[in-house]
Amino acid sequence: MANVEHGGRPGEAFGAGHGAATARLSLVRAGLWLIAAVLAVRQVAAVLRAPDSERLTDLETWVGSQGVLHVNGSLYDSTRFTGTPFSGLVLKPLTRAAEQALGWGWTFGTLLLVVALGLVAARALPQPVSRRTALLAAPVAVSLLMLSLPVRNTLYLGQTSVIPVLLVLLGCFAVRGERTSGLLIGLAAALQPTVLLFAPLLWFTGRRRAAVSTGLTFAAATALAWAAMPHDSYTYWVHHLAGVGLGGRADDLANQSLHGALLRLGVEGPLEIALFLVLAATVTVLGLRRAVRYARDGQLLLAVAVTGCVAVAVAPTTWQHQLLWVLLAMAGRVGRKAGDRYVWPVAVVLVMTLPAKMMLPNMAFLYPLRDNVVLLAALAAATAVPFLSRTSEHYHAPVPTRYARPVPTRWKHVPLLPFLRRVLTRPNLLLELLLIRVGYSAYQQVRLAATGGTNTGGRATAERHGEQIHSIEQFLFIDIEHWVNHTVVKMGWLEDFFNFYYTSFHFVVPLSVLGVLYARRPADYRWARSALGFATLLALVGFWLYPLAPPRLMPGLGFIDTVHGVQDFSQPDYGTLTALTNQYAAMPSLHFGWSLWCGLVIAILAPRWWMKALGLLHPLFTVSAIVATGNHWVLDAVGGAAVVGAGFGLTYLLQGPRPRALTPPVTDGRTTGDAKTGTAGETGAAGDAKTGATAEAEATGAAGEVSSAEPAPAKGRTPS
């Protein structure tokens, strides 16, 4: 009803509006399920297409013809089997199945378990939830699980780590009766011993029968395995201390536990053991207290996730396929402002779906953070992240985002995505930095992938394209690169200036512009950042489709590489960045494109003429530098200008014009408050922008209204 009331269509019947909203929601839901299905097919195809020797390796190690479950000795003689003796007892009957049939059945069975896990997690969200959330949560949860590294690792290796998580969720949310609930959780603990931490959670939240049932089931399953395999049980529980040393070195990067982190930091021996026990006890107490509090608050899914994160941290070994608990921590809400609500879930998704090297730069002082990024996320969820209580006034009603009023446009369909309305408030800095880092890492990977994943790959194609560009420039009489290059080399001071400019300002100036806009002009920051992002994405398409050798790497043309010296064309040297950059990503030139973006943004937004002039000097110096140093063709700069223009155009097309400060009309010597629609940095009156339901109504239903300070739209012009 609220959507209809604020929809700005007073003449539309209630039933028609509600039916249209339901149809749109059903369409979105169908699209999300389609995405989940595509991701599932892709993951299964990746497993089944892999060579037999490289897929389902753990499953083959267990139940293959030479697997440890076939031998008469101990399961742990080779240390390849990491499960408990009870899991070995459960898996033993699978040795009689045909290997190929077992592989297919295991893969599709794991896929079904992942889907079931997503469905249960979606139904376990704290109540009340909106109808939209209830319908869309399941496909989103399944998609995120399919993308997550633990699930991908589980499918590829043939692991069992999805089963304990699913058993716990079923015990907490799906079955009736505390004894049955405890039975399922106890079975999960028999497969993964740290799941026993759920017993205190059950006890202190009043489900004591379930806690007792959990303990008894675990004890019975472990005793059964001990009776059937006494030697293996002794080896696992006593000699290996519940799995330590199984599956790989405990200091391996894949072991995201406190024990593994301490070993990676160089702490060893009795000191490491004592420190690990103290830290584990501290995390357990703090984490379980938080979990109990959230369970009593009605957020049982968050309590389960927090307890699972504690189990991840305090286990002696927690391998990558056992980290699904961290993904469930997305259930918690963090932040009083609506704009801050995305920071925690986005951070969790990035941590759980991307390699750690994409999260943080490859710098030595950041290695401790990069090597333990998933562990740090688990520790944060367990002990530090300030999840909101359901009793908080901001849990259901966060501080709303402030939107700028719509700006008139020439075309009635602009913006194409009206939900991306111009926001006046400053975006969350942590989220911005995280997305910038991930975006740049993806940019590096795509540049490399364009030439087969190596710097020298695609050399012949790139040189052939270089000859094409050189021929086109000769036809257009703009082939000035050789003359400029050799002229600058003869003037030492000018060569030094362009070398310095080329190597120093490519990142400094764009980051400085973004920093100033973020601090002083938040709305304009969002506008400028979107244009830069679109331009960079379009440039990546150019790198992919048209690898191009720069002039300095074209043999026989006589160019001088003023920055890096004489080049070996078979192994070009780009200084310290050789291993990170694609030598043949010259078209379009982002060196010039980013500088042009800086110049245009400064020229548009700077308040004084001399500031605008200085801003426009930057692309002029940059294009001179890239040509003089032999790093780009003139047409590369044309391509850079094209993608920047397209970036601004896409921003306008999708989001509409940027917010503008308007001159308030004067009435009896006073200004009207309605005219204050500029950005916070421009007018100081951002607080007067409509918020909450008013802003929603204004952006959707009252889009045709303009402030008294705005000129009436001309004929043929429609306000967005």
Image (cartoon, rainbow, N blue to C red):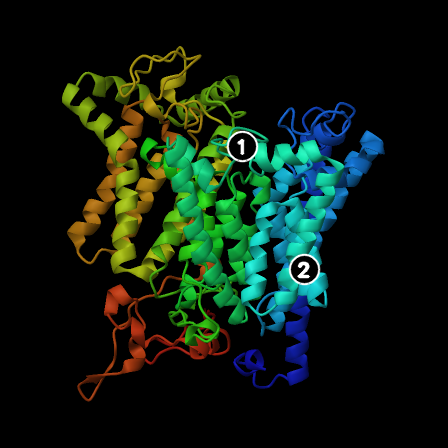
Instruction: State the SS at label 2.
Output: helix
Nearest the viewer among 106 and 264 is 264
Give how far apart the Cα atoms at labels 1 and 2 are. Answer: 61 Å
The reply to whether dot 1 and dot 2 touch (C-beta < 8 Å) is: no
Closer to viewer: mark 1 or mark 2: 2
Pick whichever of labels 1 and 2 is earlier in the sequence: 2
Q: Is residue 420 left or right of residue 110?
A: left
Task: Point out the residue furthest to the bottom here.
Answer: 668
Determine which residue is flagged by label 2. Answer: 213
Q: Is residue 547 left or right of residue 96?
A: left
At 28% from the left edge and 68% from the top edge, which residue is drawn? Answer: 661
* Residue 416 seen: no
Q: Is residue 715 above or below residue 604?
A: below
Determine which residue is flagged by label 1. Answer: 545
Residue 600 % position (x, y): 30, 49
Instruction: State the SS at label 1.
Output: helix
Q: Is residue 243 left or right of residue 579?
A: right
Residue 317 % position (x, y): 53, 38
Quadrant of the image containing the N terminus: bottom right
Residue 238 % position (x, y): 58, 35
Which mark is drawn over residue 645? none
How many numbered callouts? 2
Q: Amino acid at mark 1?
A: Leu
Q: Is residue 186 above or below residue 497?
A: below
Residue 223 % position (x, y): 70, 45
At 44% from the left edge and 25% from the top edge, which residue is drawn? Answer: 584
Q: Quadrant of residue 24?
A: bottom right
Q: How would you rate the neighbour count of disc 2 (Cα within 10 Å): few for under 14, some for 14-19, many for 20 or more?
A: many
